[in-house]
Amino acid sequence: VQLVESGGASVQVGESLRLSCRASGFSLDDDYSIGWFRQAPGKEREGVSSFTTGDGRKYYADSVKGRATLSIDDAENTVFLQMKNLKPEDTAMYYCAVRFGTHIAIGKETALHAGHYRYWGQGTQVTVSR
């Protein structure tokens, strides 16, 4: 299993970015949870957005709700995180992560908890400056 993130950049406040996570070694046709997380220096890893087949829906952290959109391209085995109206507090390393076999509903708290996930990418840096 391999997850490779890309799309991180240094941007100005109010700009937008689209992060990509290309998955290999498994199919997005199977049961899974896939999530985007971020970690700023000195802070804990925070769940940003996720999708689980068991819940059949996407979840968003309150801090990004209305500004982030998670989408999945099954044909390309790629998950995207579109973020708009970026703020300095969005500055962090962004990671995608996956766990297989989630065929039952797990709820938002678990879906956005780093401990739920088994496989992680190396991350892509997002820096937002004024």
Image: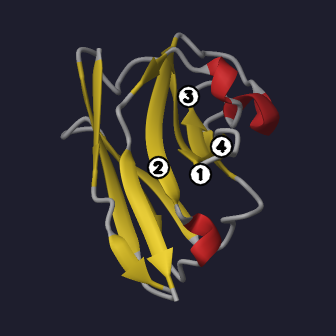
Expressed as whole percent of the image width and height from the top left, the position of residue 21 reads: 32, 42
For the residue labelled by badge 4, is the local secondary structure a helix, a strand or a loop?
strand
Mark 1, secondary structure of its residue: loop
> Mark 2 or mark 4, which has the lower sequence index?
4
Q: Which comes sooner in the sequence, label 3 or label 2?
A: 3
Q: CA distance from mark 4 to mark 3?
A: 17 Å
In front: label 4 or label 3: 4
Q: Residue at x 75, y 24 (%)?
A: 106
Q: Which mark is residue 2?
A: none
Q: Which badge, 4 or 3, comes first in the chain's sequence?
A: 4
**Residue on which disc 1 sits:** 40
Q: CA distance from mark 3 to mark 2?
A: 26 Å
Residue drawn 53% across the image and 64% down it: 91
Circle number at residue 93: 2
Q: How far across and down, in percent of the image, does residue 71 sit?
A: 42, 53
At 65% from the left and 73% from the top, the residue drawn is 66
Looking at the image, can residue 80 be seen? Answer: no
Q: Is residue 110 left or right of residue 47?
A: right
Any mark on residue 53, and which? 3
What residue is at 44 percent from the left and 68 percent from the top? Answer: 127
Label 2: which secondary element: strand
Which of labels 3 and 1 is toward the front?
A: 1
Q: Does 126 sit above or below residue 120?
A: below
- Amino acid type of disc 3? Thr
Task: Please state which amino acid type lies under the numbered disc 2.
Answer: Met
Between discs 1 and 2, the one toward the N terminus: 1
Mark 4 highlights which residue?
A: 47
In the image, residue 64 sits, relative to residue 116, either above or below, namely below
Between the C-alphas of marks 2 and 4, the distance is 12 Å
* Number of other residues with Cα within 10 Å of mark 3, as a class: few under 14, some 14 to 19, many 20 or more: many
